Amino acid sequence: MSKLASTRRGFLVSAALLPLAACAPPPPKHTLSPRGDRLVRMIQTTGRDNMTAPEALALMGITNQGRDIPVRQLADDGPDGRYVVNLVNIRKVHEFVFQRRQGDVLVLHSADTAFKRLQSVRYARNGKPTIITDIAFAERDFQQQTAFWFDRIPGR
């Protein structure tokens, strides 16, 4: 009988606390790394609104039903060319698209806000975009592009 009473008591306590748990705010979803958060803020405050052609970004899975994709963009010159970082919010989450021109080829990398490279694309000036299958090259170039922007993030 004592065991039944303690089980019933536990059930009643749980039932009493259940409405409190339902009213509690959900735990915050933090997908941003601290650097990602600072880069997002830097792009939002100093970048400019722009539209990018959809072809290369479509290969990365970022689409706007065939139309140009709205981005917030920040660009700067480096020792080996022009670097650009785009903040894309087309899928209702922040994503970065890093790009750099190497001669007549544009190399683009999509990444989440924790700087995990998701996809890389090579886009020749007079050609069509293609996915970069050389993982070592893609990762090395991605690290070089992110390092360029890490050096410019305030409060690092």
Image (spheres, grey):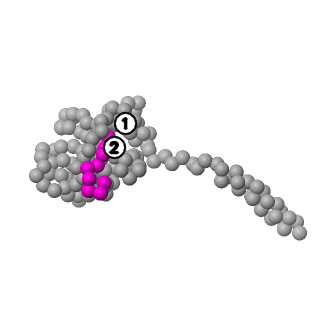
Segment tinted magenta in the rendering: 64-72
Q: Residue at x 77, y 62 (%)?
A: 11
Q: CA distance from mark 2 to mark 1?
A: 8 Å
Q: Quadrant of the C terminus?
A: top left
User: What residue is pinned by disc 2?
Assistant: 87
- Please give left or right for residue 138 compared with residue 19 in the image: left
Whether residue 128 appears in magenta in the rendering, the answer is: no
Callout 2 environment at 10 Å: few (<14), some (14 to 19), or many (20+)? many
User: What residue is pinned by disc 1?
Assistant: 44
Q: Quadrant of the N terminus?
A: bottom right
Q: Residue at x 74, y 58 (%)?
A: 14
Please indicate, yes or no, whether residue 140 appears anywhere in the rendered image.
no
Evaluate if marks 2 and 1 touch, with contact meaning CB atoms under 8 Å apart: yes
> In the structure shown, which secondary structural element does the residue marked by tag 2 occupy?
strand
> How far across and how far down the image is residue 119, in percent?
29, 55
> In the structure shown, which secondary structural element does the residue marked by tag 1 occupy?
helix
> How far across and how far down the image is residue 65, in percent?
29, 57
Whether residue 68 appears in magenta in the rendering, the answer is: yes
Q: Residue at x 49, y 46 (%)?
A: 30
Q: First in sequence, mark 2 or 1: give its number.
A: 1
Kind of residue indicated by mark 1: Gln
